[in-house]
Amino acid sequence: MHSRMLNWNTDCIDCMAIFNCELCYECIDCEDCYGCAFSESSKNCSDSYFLRDCIGCSNCIGCTNLRNKRYWIFNEPHSRADYERYRGALDFGSHAALSHAKEAFEALFAAEPRPEMEAANVENSSGNYIRNSRNALSCFQVANVEDCKYCDHLTNARSCMDVSFFGVSETNELLYECEAVGHGTFRVMFSKLIWGGGRDIAYSYECFASNQLFGSSGLKRKQFCILNKQYSEAGYHELKARIIEHMKDTGEWGEFFPMTMSPFSYNESLAGDLMPLTKDEVLARGLKWQPQPKPQKSKLHELPDNIAETPDASAGLPLVCETSGQRYRIERQELLFHRKLGLALPRLCPEERTRRRFAKIALPADKQRKCSDCSNSFTTAFDPVRHPKVVCSKCYEKYVD
Protein backbone atom coordinates (compact mmCIF):
# COMPACT_ATOMS: atom_id res chain seq x y z
CA MET A 1 0.00 0.00 0.00
CA HIS A 2 1.22 3.52 -0.89
CA SER A 3 4.44 2.02 -2.28
CA ARG A 4 6.39 2.01 -5.54
CA MET A 5 8.53 -0.59 -7.31
CA LEU A 6 8.07 -3.61 -5.05
CA ASN A 7 8.99 -7.25 -5.68
CA TRP A 8 7.84 -10.27 -3.62
CA ASN A 9 6.96 -8.46 -0.40
CA THR A 10 4.38 -9.06 2.32
CA ASP A 11 2.62 -6.52 4.55
CA CYS A 12 4.71 -3.47 3.67
CA ILE A 13 3.47 0.12 3.52
CA ASP A 14 5.06 3.35 2.30
CA CYS A 15 8.12 1.66 0.80
CA MET A 16 10.11 2.02 -2.40
CA ALA A 17 12.22 -0.47 -4.36
CA ILE A 18 12.30 -3.28 -1.80
CA PHE A 19 12.72 -7.03 -2.40
CA ASN A 20 11.53 -10.00 -0.33
CA CYS A 21 10.63 -7.88 2.70
CA GLU A 22 7.91 -8.32 5.30
CA LEU A 23 6.33 -5.95 7.83
CA CYS A 24 8.46 -3.02 6.69
CA TYR A 25 7.50 0.65 6.79
CA GLU A 26 9.12 3.63 5.08
CA CYS A 27 11.98 1.55 3.70
CA ILE A 28 13.92 2.27 0.50
CA ASP A 29 16.15 -0.09 -1.49
CA CYS A 30 16.05 -2.88 1.08
CA GLU A 31 16.23 -6.64 0.56
CA ASP A 32 15.26 -9.63 2.73
CA CYS A 33 14.33 -7.43 5.71
CA TYR A 34 11.71 -8.13 8.39
CA GLY A 35 10.10 -5.70 10.81
CA CYS A 36 12.22 -2.70 9.78
CA ALA A 37 11.18 0.93 9.54
CA PHE A 38 12.72 4.15 8.16
CA SER A 39 15.66 2.25 6.67
CA GLU A 40 17.60 2.52 3.42
CA SER A 41 19.94 0.36 1.35
CA SER A 42 19.98 -2.49 3.87
CA LYS A 43 19.87 -6.27 3.53
CA ASN A 44 18.99 -9.22 5.78
CA CYS A 45 18.09 -6.95 8.71
CA SER A 46 15.29 -7.38 11.22
CA ASP A 47 13.50 -5.53 14.02
CA SER A 48 15.46 -2.36 13.42
CA TYR A 49 14.83 1.34 12.84
CA PHE A 50 16.65 4.07 10.94
CA LEU A 51 19.32 1.99 9.24
CA ARG A 52 21.36 2.79 6.17
CA ASP A 53 23.68 0.42 4.35
CA CYS A 54 23.49 -2.27 7.02
CA ILE A 55 23.73 -6.02 6.34
CA GLY A 56 22.76 -8.87 8.65
CA CYS A 57 21.81 -6.59 11.56
CA SER A 58 19.00 -7.02 14.08
CA ASN A 59 17.68 -4.89 16.93
CA CYS A 60 19.60 -1.81 15.88
CA ILE A 61 18.59 1.85 15.90
CA GLY A 62 20.11 4.79 14.07
CA CYS A 63 23.03 2.92 12.51
CA THR A 64 24.95 3.14 9.24
CA ASN A 65 27.43 0.89 7.45
CA LEU A 66 27.24 -2.01 9.94
CA ARG A 67 27.69 -5.71 9.22
CA ASN A 68 26.19 -8.51 11.34
CA LYS A 69 25.57 -6.45 14.48
CA ARG A 70 22.93 -6.73 17.19
CA TYR A 71 21.79 -4.27 19.86
CA TRP A 72 23.63 -1.28 18.44
CA ILE A 73 22.47 2.32 18.85
CA PHE A 74 24.03 5.21 16.89
CA ASN A 75 26.78 2.83 15.73
CA GLU A 76 27.72 1.91 19.30
CA PRO A 77 27.27 -1.55 20.93
CA HIS A 78 24.91 -1.97 23.89
CA SER A 79 23.67 -4.78 26.08
CA ARG A 80 20.27 -6.25 25.32
CA ALA A 81 18.82 -4.71 28.50
CA ASP A 82 20.15 -1.24 27.67
CA TYR A 83 18.89 -1.52 24.10
CA GLU A 84 15.38 -2.51 25.18
CA ARG A 85 15.28 0.33 27.72
CA TYR A 86 16.28 2.83 25.04
CA ARG A 87 13.84 1.42 22.50
CA GLY A 88 10.97 1.57 24.98
CA ALA A 89 11.75 5.17 25.89
CA LEU A 90 11.58 6.28 22.27
CA ASP A 91 7.85 5.50 21.93
CA PHE A 92 7.56 5.53 18.14
CA GLY A 93 3.81 5.23 18.61
CA SER A 94 3.72 8.94 19.47
CA HIS A 95 3.68 11.26 16.47
CA ALA A 96 5.51 13.98 18.39
CA ALA A 97 8.21 11.60 19.62
CA LEU A 98 8.60 9.96 16.20
CA SER A 99 8.93 13.34 14.46
CA HIS A 100 11.70 14.31 16.88
CA ALA A 101 13.47 10.98 16.31
CA LYS A 102 13.25 11.39 12.52
CA GLU A 103 14.98 14.77 12.69
CA ALA A 104 17.79 13.36 14.83
CA PHE A 105 18.37 10.30 12.67
CA GLU A 106 18.16 12.20 9.38
CA ALA A 107 20.84 14.58 10.68
CA LEU A 108 22.99 11.51 11.39
CA PHE A 109 22.45 10.16 7.88
CA ALA A 110 23.25 13.53 6.29
CA ALA A 111 26.69 13.54 7.94
CA GLU A 112 27.59 10.08 6.63
CA PRO A 113 29.06 9.61 3.12
CA ARG A 114 27.41 7.69 0.32
CA PRO A 115 29.36 5.21 -1.82
CA GLU A 116 29.86 6.09 -5.47
CA MET A 117 27.44 3.26 -6.35
CA GLU A 118 24.94 1.30 -4.27
CA ALA A 119 25.57 -2.23 -5.51
CA ALA A 120 26.04 -5.82 -4.35
CA ASN A 121 27.62 -8.73 -6.19
CA VAL A 122 28.13 -6.93 -9.49
CA GLU A 123 30.77 -7.04 -12.22
CA ASN A 124 31.61 -4.35 -14.77
CA SER A 125 28.49 -2.31 -14.01
CA SER A 126 27.56 1.35 -13.63
CA GLY A 127 24.51 3.25 -12.42
CA ASN A 128 22.98 2.69 -8.98
CA TYR A 129 21.00 0.23 -6.85
CA ILE A 130 22.29 -2.81 -8.75
CA ARG A 131 22.25 -6.39 -7.43
CA ASN A 132 23.61 -9.70 -8.69
CA SER A 133 24.38 -8.38 -12.18
CA ARG A 134 27.09 -8.41 -14.82
CA ASN A 135 27.73 -5.86 -17.55
CA ALA A 136 24.84 -3.64 -16.44
CA LEU A 137 25.77 -0.23 -17.81
CA SER A 138 23.94 2.96 -16.79
CA CYS A 139 21.30 0.85 -15.06
CA PHE A 140 19.24 1.79 -12.01
CA GLN A 141 17.23 -0.38 -9.61
CA VAL A 142 18.05 -3.63 -11.41
CA ALA A 143 18.72 -7.16 -10.17
CA ASN A 144 19.85 -10.36 -11.86
CA VAL A 145 20.55 -8.74 -15.22
CA GLU A 146 23.37 -9.37 -17.68
CA ASP A 147 24.57 -7.45 -20.72
CA CYS A 148 22.00 -4.68 -20.28
CA LYS A 149 22.24 -0.94 -20.84
CA TYR A 150 20.07 2.07 -19.96
CA CYS A 151 17.58 -0.05 -17.99
CA ASP A 152 15.75 0.75 -14.78
CA HIS A 153 13.56 -1.16 -12.33
CA LEU A 154 14.25 -4.42 -14.12
CA THR A 155 14.90 -7.95 -12.83
CA ASN A 156 15.86 -11.24 -14.50
CA ALA A 157 16.87 -9.89 -17.90
CA ARG A 158 19.61 -10.49 -20.44
CA SER A 159 20.76 -8.52 -23.49
CA CYS A 160 18.27 -5.67 -23.07
CA MET A 161 18.48 -1.94 -23.74
CA ASP A 162 16.27 1.03 -22.86
CA VAL A 163 13.82 -0.99 -20.78
CA SER A 164 11.84 0.32 -17.79
CA PHE A 165 10.04 -2.21 -15.57
CA PHE A 166 9.79 -5.12 -14.85
CA GLY A 167 11.13 -8.51 -15.91
CA VAL A 168 10.25 -10.32 -12.66
CA SER A 169 10.01 -14.10 -13.16
CA GLU A 170 11.86 -16.25 -15.70
CA THR A 171 14.51 -14.81 -18.01
CA ASN A 172 13.57 -11.95 -20.30
CA GLU A 173 15.85 -11.49 -23.30
CA LEU A 174 16.42 -9.16 -26.25
CA LEU A 175 14.03 -6.42 -25.13
CA TYR A 176 14.44 -2.93 -26.59
CA GLU A 177 12.59 0.34 -25.93
CA CYS A 178 9.95 -1.31 -23.72
CA GLU A 179 8.05 -0.55 -20.55
CA ALA A 180 6.45 -3.01 -18.11
CA VAL A 181 7.44 -6.12 -20.04
CA GLY A 182 8.29 -9.44 -18.41
CA HIS A 183 7.52 -12.96 -17.25
CA GLY A 184 9.54 -14.78 -19.89
CA THR A 185 9.37 -12.41 -22.86
CA PHE A 186 11.76 -12.64 -25.82
CA ARG A 187 12.57 -10.22 -28.65
CA VAL A 188 10.02 -7.53 -27.83
CA MET A 189 10.45 -3.96 -29.08
CA PHE A 190 8.69 -0.61 -28.67
CA SER A 191 5.93 -2.15 -26.56
CA LYS A 192 4.27 -1.86 -23.16
CA LEU A 193 2.62 -4.40 -20.83
CA ILE A 194 3.69 -7.54 -22.66
CA TRP A 195 3.99 -10.62 -20.44
CA GLY A 196 3.38 -14.33 -20.13
CA GLY A 197 6.05 -15.57 -22.56
CA GLY A 198 5.40 -13.14 -25.41
CA ARG A 199 7.84 -13.42 -28.33
CA ASP A 200 8.62 -11.41 -31.46
CA ILE A 201 6.33 -8.47 -30.70
CA ALA A 202 6.61 -4.82 -31.76
CA TYR A 203 4.56 -1.67 -31.20
CA SER A 204 1.97 -3.50 -29.12
CA TYR A 205 0.20 -2.89 -25.84
CA GLU A 206 -1.16 -5.13 -23.08
CA CYS A 207 -0.88 -8.54 -24.73
CA PHE A 208 -0.56 -11.84 -22.89
CA ALA A 209 1.09 -15.12 -23.93
CA SER A 210 1.13 -14.11 -27.60
CA ASN A 211 3.69 -14.34 -30.40
CA GLN A 212 4.34 -12.52 -33.68
CA LEU A 213 2.30 -9.35 -33.06
CA PHE A 214 2.65 -5.92 -34.62
CA GLY A 215 0.66 -2.83 -33.64
CA SER A 216 -1.80 -4.84 -31.57
CA SER A 217 -3.51 -4.30 -28.24
CA GLY A 218 -5.35 -6.37 -25.65
CA LEU A 219 -4.70 -9.78 -27.23
CA LYS A 220 -4.42 -13.07 -25.35
CA ARG A 221 -2.83 -16.24 -26.74
CA LYS A 222 -2.78 -14.98 -30.31
CA GLN A 223 -0.16 -14.99 -33.07
CA PHE A 224 0.44 -13.46 -36.53
CA CYS A 225 -1.73 -10.39 -35.83
CA ILE A 226 -1.36 -6.84 -37.14
CA LEU A 227 -3.64 -4.14 -35.74
CA ASN A 228 -5.48 -6.99 -33.98
CA LYS A 229 -6.33 -8.65 -37.30
CA GLN A 230 -5.40 -12.30 -37.81
CA TYR A 231 -3.18 -13.18 -40.81
CA SER A 232 -1.57 -16.30 -42.15
CA GLU A 233 2.12 -16.66 -41.26
CA ALA A 234 3.22 -15.67 -44.78
CA GLY A 235 0.72 -12.81 -44.98
CA TYR A 236 1.82 -11.52 -41.59
CA HIS A 237 5.50 -11.34 -42.48
CA GLU A 238 4.80 -9.75 -45.88
CA LEU A 239 2.57 -6.99 -44.50
CA LYS A 240 4.83 -6.38 -41.50
CA ALA A 241 7.82 -5.82 -43.81
CA ARG A 242 5.83 -3.29 -45.87
CA ILE A 243 4.72 -1.41 -42.74
CA ILE A 244 8.26 -1.23 -41.40
CA GLU A 245 9.53 0.17 -44.71
CA HIS A 246 6.83 2.84 -44.60
CA MET A 247 7.71 3.70 -40.98
CA LYS A 248 11.37 4.04 -41.94
CA ASP A 249 10.41 6.49 -44.69
CA THR A 250 8.35 8.58 -42.25
CA GLY A 251 10.97 8.37 -39.46
CA GLU A 252 8.65 6.51 -37.08
CA TRP A 253 10.48 3.18 -37.01
CA GLY A 254 12.87 2.49 -34.14
CA GLU A 255 11.35 4.66 -31.41
CA PHE A 256 8.91 4.04 -28.56
CA PHE A 257 5.45 5.64 -28.69
CA PRO A 258 5.77 9.44 -28.34
CA MET A 259 4.94 10.98 -24.95
CA THR A 260 2.22 13.08 -26.58
CA MET A 261 0.15 9.87 -26.86
CA SER A 262 0.05 9.43 -23.08
CA PRO A 263 -3.45 9.80 -21.57
CA PHE A 264 -1.86 11.05 -18.34
CA SER A 265 -0.50 14.45 -17.43
CA TYR A 266 3.24 14.60 -16.87
CA ASN A 267 3.00 15.68 -13.23
CA GLU A 268 0.61 12.86 -12.31
CA SER A 269 2.84 10.14 -13.75
CA LEU A 270 5.97 8.38 -12.54
CA ALA A 271 7.95 10.46 -15.06
CA GLY A 272 7.25 13.53 -12.94
CA ASP A 273 8.97 11.85 -9.99
CA LEU A 274 11.95 10.36 -11.84
CA MET A 275 12.59 13.42 -14.01
CA PRO A 276 10.98 16.48 -12.39
CA LEU A 277 10.10 19.33 -14.75
CA THR A 278 8.35 22.66 -14.18
CA LYS A 279 4.96 23.38 -15.66
CA ASP A 280 6.50 25.63 -18.33
CA GLU A 281 9.03 22.94 -19.30
CA VAL A 282 6.28 20.34 -19.62
CA LEU A 283 4.02 22.54 -21.74
CA ALA A 284 6.96 23.57 -23.96
CA ARG A 285 7.39 19.88 -24.86
CA GLY A 286 3.77 19.64 -25.93
CA LEU A 287 2.76 17.51 -22.92
CA LYS A 288 -0.19 17.79 -20.57
CA TRP A 289 -0.07 19.32 -17.08
CA GLN A 290 -2.66 18.54 -14.42
CA PRO A 291 -3.62 21.55 -12.24
CA GLN A 292 -3.24 20.73 -8.57
CA PRO A 293 -6.32 20.86 -6.33
CA LYS A 294 -6.54 23.85 -4.04
CA PRO A 295 -5.18 23.22 -0.52
CA GLN A 296 -7.70 22.65 2.26
CA LYS A 297 -7.57 25.68 4.53
CA SER A 298 -9.17 24.18 7.63
CA LYS A 299 -8.59 20.88 9.36
CA LEU A 300 -11.39 18.33 9.02
CA HIS A 301 -10.37 15.86 11.72
CA GLU A 302 -7.36 15.44 13.97
CA LEU A 303 -5.70 12.16 14.88
CA PRO A 304 -4.68 11.41 18.47
CA ASP A 305 -0.94 11.78 19.04
CA ASN A 306 -0.37 8.12 19.90
CA ILE A 307 -1.36 5.07 17.86
CA ALA A 308 -2.39 3.39 21.12
CA GLU A 309 -5.06 6.07 21.59
CA THR A 310 -6.36 5.96 18.02
CA PRO A 311 -9.88 4.44 17.77
CA ASP A 312 -11.15 2.26 14.92
CA ALA A 313 -13.37 5.14 13.81
CA SER A 314 -10.29 7.07 12.67
CA ALA A 315 -10.05 4.86 9.58
CA GLY A 316 -11.78 6.51 6.64
CA LEU A 317 -12.09 9.98 8.16
CA PRO A 318 -11.07 12.87 5.87
CA LEU A 319 -7.73 14.34 6.98
CA VAL A 320 -5.62 17.23 5.72
CA CYS A 321 -1.94 16.86 4.80
CA GLU A 322 0.26 19.06 7.00
CA THR A 323 2.48 20.00 4.04
CA SER A 324 0.40 20.07 0.86
CA GLY A 325 -2.99 20.83 2.38
CA GLN A 326 -4.54 18.02 0.30
CA ARG A 327 -7.16 15.67 1.66
CA TYR A 328 -6.34 12.05 2.42
CA ARG A 329 -7.55 9.26 4.65
CA ILE A 330 -6.18 6.40 6.72
CA GLU A 331 -7.44 3.05 5.48
CA ARG A 332 -8.46 0.36 7.95
CA GLN A 333 -5.66 -1.94 6.77
CA GLU A 334 -3.23 0.93 7.31
CA LEU A 335 -4.49 1.53 10.87
CA LEU A 336 -4.11 -2.16 11.78
CA PHE A 337 -0.60 -2.22 10.31
CA HIS A 338 0.52 0.77 12.39
CA ARG A 339 -0.95 -0.75 15.51
CA LYS A 340 0.90 -3.99 14.85
CA LEU A 341 4.24 -2.21 14.47
CA GLY A 342 3.53 0.37 17.18
CA LEU A 343 4.17 3.30 14.84
CA ALA A 344 2.38 6.65 14.75
CA LEU A 345 0.05 7.31 11.84
CA PRO A 346 1.31 9.69 9.13
CA ARG A 347 0.19 13.31 9.02
CA LEU A 348 1.16 13.62 5.36
CA CYS A 349 -0.88 12.49 2.36
CA PRO A 350 0.41 9.48 0.35
CA GLU A 351 1.56 11.71 -2.53
CA GLU A 352 3.67 13.88 -0.22
CA ARG A 353 5.17 10.81 1.45
CA THR A 354 6.09 9.41 -1.96
CA ARG A 355 7.63 12.72 -3.00
CA ARG A 356 9.84 12.70 0.09
CA ARG A 357 11.02 9.17 -0.59
CA PHE A 358 12.01 10.16 -4.12
CA ALA A 359 13.96 13.09 -2.63
CA LYS A 360 16.12 10.59 -0.72
CA ILE A 361 17.18 8.39 -3.62
CA ALA A 362 19.61 9.00 -6.44
CA LEU A 363 17.56 9.63 -9.57
CA PRO A 364 18.62 7.87 -12.80
CA ALA A 365 21.46 10.00 -14.17
CA ASP A 366 25.24 9.82 -14.49
CA LYS A 367 27.32 12.62 -12.98
CA GLN A 368 31.07 13.14 -12.85
CA ARG A 369 32.23 13.78 -9.29
CA LYS A 370 35.33 13.55 -7.13
CA CYS A 371 35.71 11.47 -4.00
CA SER A 372 35.15 13.61 -0.90
CA ASP A 373 38.12 11.89 0.78
CA CYS A 374 40.80 11.21 -1.84
CA SER A 375 39.63 13.34 -4.82
CA ASN A 376 39.60 10.42 -7.26
CA SER A 377 37.12 10.96 -10.12
CA PHE A 378 34.19 8.64 -10.80
CA THR A 379 30.73 8.52 -12.34
CA THR A 380 27.86 8.40 -9.87
CA ALA A 381 24.10 8.90 -9.69
CA PHE A 382 24.36 10.94 -6.48
CA ASP A 383 24.07 14.64 -7.26
CA PRO A 384 25.93 17.18 -5.07
CA VAL A 385 22.78 18.99 -3.95
CA ARG A 386 20.96 16.01 -2.48
CA HIS A 387 24.07 14.06 -1.48
CA PRO A 388 27.01 16.41 -0.84
CA LYS A 389 29.43 13.77 0.48
CA VAL A 390 30.16 10.84 -1.84
CA VAL A 391 33.29 8.70 -1.67
CA CYS A 392 34.88 6.13 -3.98
CA SER A 393 34.51 2.42 -3.31
CA LYS A 394 37.97 2.10 -1.79
CA CYS A 395 37.51 5.00 0.62
CA TYR A 396 34.03 3.79 1.57
CA GLU A 397 35.50 0.59 3.03
CA LYS A 398 36.91 2.48 6.00
CA TYR A 399 33.39 3.59 6.99
CA VAL A 400 32.08 0.01 7.18
CA ASP A 401 32.17 -1.80 10.52
Image (cartoon, rainbow, N blue to C red):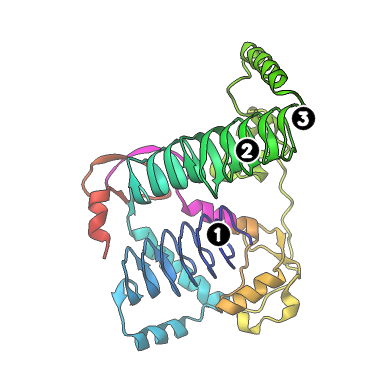
Q: Farthest residue in the top direction?
A: 249
Quadrant of the image occupied by residue 105: bottom left
Provide the residue span drawn in magenta.
Answer: 354-371
Q: Nearer the viewer, residue 318 or 49?
A: 49
Q: Residues within 10 Å of mark 2 (few under 14, many from 20)?
A: many
Amino acid at pointer 3: Asn
In the image, is residue 358 part of the stretch drawn in magenta? yes
**Apparent side of residue 62 relative to residue 312 in the rendered image (left or right):** left
Determine which of the numbered discs, if any, sits on residue 228 in the image.
Answer: 3
Q: Residue 359's x, y, as percent? A: 50, 52
User: What residue sits 51% from the left and 54% below the top?
Assistant: 17
Amino acid at pointer 1: Trp
Q: Which one is closest to the eye, mark 1 or mark 3?
A: 3
Q: Which one is closest to the eye, mark 1 or mark 2?
A: 2
- The residue indicated by pointer 1 is 8
Q: Farthest residue in the left direction?
A: 374
Q: Residues within 10 Å of mark 1 (few under 14, many from 20)?
A: few
User: What residue sits 56% from the left and 36% below the top?
Assistant: 186
Amino acid at pointer 2: Gly
Q: Earlier along the polypeptide chain: callout 1 or callout 3?
A: 1
Give the structural element (helix, strand or loop) at label 2: loop
Instruction: Check whether the beta carbons of the residues at disc 1 and disc 2 lie within 8 A of each other.
Output: no
Q: Residue 365's x, y, as percent? A: 44, 39
Q: What separation in Å lies between label 1 and label 3 (alpha carbons)?
A: 33 Å
Give the structural element (helix, strand or loop) at label 3: loop
- The residue indicated by pointer 2 is 198
